[in-house]
Image (cartoon, grey):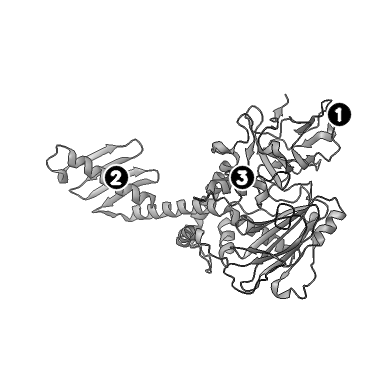
Amino acid sequence: MKYSYRLSLILTLTLFVMACSPSTDPTTQELEVDTGATTIEQDFAAGIYAFESRIGDIRFENGYPTEATAQKLYDEMDFQRAVQVYLWSVPLVAMQAVHERLRETGETPFSPGIFEDLLPPSTLVFTGNNTTLYAIHTYVIDKDDPVVLEVPSGAILGMINNAWQQALADLGPPGPDKGQGGKYLILPPGYDGETPDDGYFVIQSDSYQIYWLLRSFDPAPAGVDVLKSVRMYRWSQRDNPPPMQPYNASPLGLDLTYPEESGYFEMLARALINEYPRPEDKNMLGIMAELGIETGKPFAPDERMQAIFAEAAKLGNAMAATISFNSRFPEAKVWPDREYSFIFIGGTPSFDNGVRHMIDSRVNLTYQAFSTAESMALELVGQGSTYIASAKDASGDWLDGSQTYRLRVSAYVPARTFWALNVYDTGTRSMIDTEQGVPGLDDGADLQRNADGTIDIYMGPTAPEGMESNWIQTLPNRGFFIYFRLYGPEKEWFDRSWKLDDIERID
């Protein structure tokens, strides 16, 4: 499409220039124009139109593309489309990966995974943390049978997401239940059946696949008991719900990440095969259909398309990493004089600013993290949570696991519940897995404090002498980045009157 547009534009401009020139007979004139980027050759008498491009020589004769040109253009068209499909589909493929990986454990539709021993570094999941107890689950809603999710009251926080990692509802104090617990009735797309008048928080999903996460701020075993009290059942089973079958996911060493290159487009096709086609996705679904990825149809690319998909996945993944780690958005910075970035660029977990979908903002988050909540992005003083990220030190250099760094945390941090710091591997975007086995620290840990109440946290291959309690081990010759989380952020966070010091390299 891009090249067709360029061809039309070049032809129009060339004809205009020639019409305005003193030449008496443009049909017999040969013209060679050097544009800097391409060289254009025109011979109107012979009906030749040719130019050099980034994909090689392009040639039209009598207005028609040569066979070689047509093949080049179709190959390039399919490649460009595949790269854009990759970037557009990152949240969906990441969700599908979690769904498939959990089912591979033998999980059933009503057996959520609970990390009873916290989330270990051996579990690969995008920017998870080891400071709270988790329960996670995916579910595919029947077209004619909604699902009920019962959440308990207490010190919990969570969310329900659609297949695109967009928030359908927050759970706990920021959500409709206000921390008092309750029943969430989640309706499938297009559902027009029976719904209750009261007693439920009715949530309309725009996808069949959903995901929910619930964290407990109570330590084990009380926190585990809270998570085990979650119930989920089909609407048709409401009078006699079957028992839940939760399992301990901590020792399983799960890999909940998606295949970044080989297998990416196959997983995308599986995610879409029975999914609801949302109106806002129809343009991209049309492009995908031209690539052989279509709802309700098998995915069987030929050898040519397999090669194109393989290259597109490599480039798409590289672009996603660049968007996520080296953002070109000015509004990504939390403070102008600090090396910290928002993970929600644009301030909305829906990635919709009311005018357009913010595709790069969505890539920025879903490449490095998993799942969203309204309370992660909106201004809710004392509720929810907020995350900021940094991959650079105070000098603007990338964080390097071979070096030692110090982060000085102020005596007062505007977090009503607590704050936490986690270190992540840039390759896996999961918690760093080292011999030490401590990928994160929080203000509830036994940390040494300075005389003024500040806390120095060290990150490096070895601990500075006497600072083992305040140290997170890193891996030499590997990059890392951090998340600093505030649970229950206070007003000083929202008005930016509080600042977190930059990470300093210690020579």
The Cα–Cα distance between marks 3 and 2, rounded to whole angstroms, is: 40 Å
Q: Considering depth in this image, is 97 or 350 the residue closer to the camera?
A: 350
Q: Quadrant of residue 323?
A: top right
Tag 1 residue: 466
The answer to whether the residues at label 2 and label 1 have Cβ atoms under 8 Å apart is no
Residue drawn at 72 percent across, 60 percent down: 137
The Cα–Cα distance between marks 2 and 1, rounded to whole angstroms, is: 69 Å
The Cα–Cα distance between marks 3 and 1, rounded to whole angstroms, is: 37 Å
Mark 1 secondary-structure assignment: loop
Percent from the top left, x then y, of residue 340?
64, 35
Which amino acid, mark 3?
Answer: Phe
Res. 344 mark: 3
Tag 2 residue: 10
Which amino acid, mark 1?
Answer: Gly
Label tally? 3
Q: Considering depth in this image, is 60 or 243 the residue closer to the camera?
A: 243
Residue drawn at 69 percent across, 43 percent down: 386
Position of residue 394 in the picture relative to residue 455 (left or right): left
Q: Earlier in the sequence, mark 3 or mark 2?
A: 2
Percent from the top left, x then y, of residue 472?
78, 37
